[in-house]
Amino acid sequence: MRVLLISQDFPPESGGIQTYAYEVSRRLAERCSLFTAVVPKRNAGEEMSREFPGKILRLPVRPDMLPLAAIPVLPFLASEGKFQVALHTQWQTAVASLIARRLTGYPEKIVVAAHGRELKYEPNWVVTWLRPIVTSRVDHFIAVSHFTAGLLQDYRVPAADISVVGNGTDPTVFYPADATPLRRSLGIENKMVLLTVGRLTPHKGIDTTLHALGLLKEDFPDLHYLIVGTGPDRERLEGLARAEDVIEKVHFVGAVPPDDLRDYYNACDAFIMASRLDGADVEGFGIAFLEAAACGKPVIGGRSGGTEDAVLDGETGLLVDPVDVRAVAESIRTLLEDPDTSERLGKNGRRHVVDTANWDSVADKIHRILLDVVG
């Protein structure tokens, strides 16, 4: 099979879609007779391109400009390679494939991955006008969660044209390990530790967790909270931590290199991300839940968006109302006071990743879907 992948988001940039695009594409490249990825150019990514099992064509544009930059490139590229299918990691770039197919007949089929926010974001009238046109002309969608599949059906995409394939992670990268040196360096050795990994924006629910810490501080005076990530909400969150009088127990770690992230997951007793719907911002899935689970940690997620596909309630973690501070606090209390439950959820989470929620399984499912679409 000859596959063309187009993605605005790709390493060395970091993020959920970047991870999805890279992990899926490098596995698909090994399964295809011809595979080319079209992505934005980043100087730091040249070494990655040399090690990639397929071909990476990096266009010299910003990620947000790739949908336009791909339009003059794809007709020639698609017809030259006679690509049977183009897999787009966002609907915006599918415009280029639709034009290429109209002009040359290639790619023969167009498949788009759907994550969540890109189906709700309304930055201008062009997006509002163009999105339903594109979604009506795509041959098939791969949604990362049942929630995202529902968003597609809001655009009248037939259920038969949607496959749900949840995200994954790599259990050979994220696994249980001793994090004593990191705990010692952060001054949290022998403390109870919560962890959130994600961009600092309101929809991640970090503010709710800080309010929950305020309720728990008397009963758990040794409870610390690590927040890994950067974003525009940091100043407000620091203010909330001070207002709740827990600022000395909250560690705003900032950005962490990918190679060090496993240590942070292993340094916590429980992972929490009480994500909620906030305008267009929504948790389409939540790969961080799987990364924590792969490290054998119990997780707490907000019952919103696609989190229900990432966290198996009562099996790999706990789902709670993300806007109910007391419910969030009680879920934390449950895991801290009941080590047997925490251990069971953590072990189940690791097993779930090893057996099912890993990138090899995800790529296999997507490969079979592409074969079915091509026919």
Image (cartoon, helix red, strand yellow):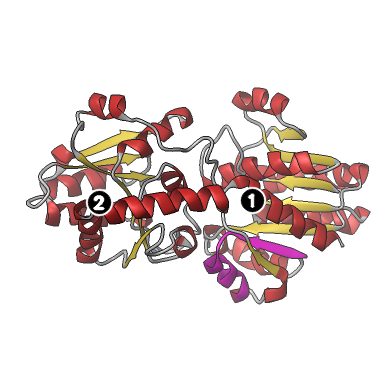
Residue beneath the point at 67% across and 65% down: 163
Image quarter hosting the C terminus: bottom right
Q: Which residue is mark 1?
A: 361
User: With respect to residue 55, does 309 lie above or below?
Assistant: below
Q: Which mark is residue 339?
A: 2
Ranked by sequence position, the earlier of labels 2 and 1 is 2
Out of 181 and 63, give the one closest to the viewer: 181
The one of 187 and 127 positioned closer to us in this rendering:
187
The label shown at residue 192 is: none
User: Secondary structure beneath disc 1?
Assistant: helix
Give the percent coordinates (x, y) of residue 44.
Answer: 60, 24
Residue type pointed to by label 2: Pro
Residue drawn 61% across and 46% down?
Answer: 359
Number of the front mark, 2 or 1: 2
What amino acid is found at the position of numbered circle 1 in the picture? Ser
**Horizontal side of residue 163 vs 317, given as left or right:** right
On screen, residue 272 versus residue 249, left or right, reads right
Q: Quadrant of residue 344?
A: bottom left
Q: Secondary structure at mark 2?
A: helix
Q: Quadrant of residue 145?
A: bottom right
**Which stretch did the figure color magenta?**
139-153
Q: Is residue 364 visible?
A: yes
Against 42, residue 234 (above or below) is below
Number of numbered labels in the structure image: 2
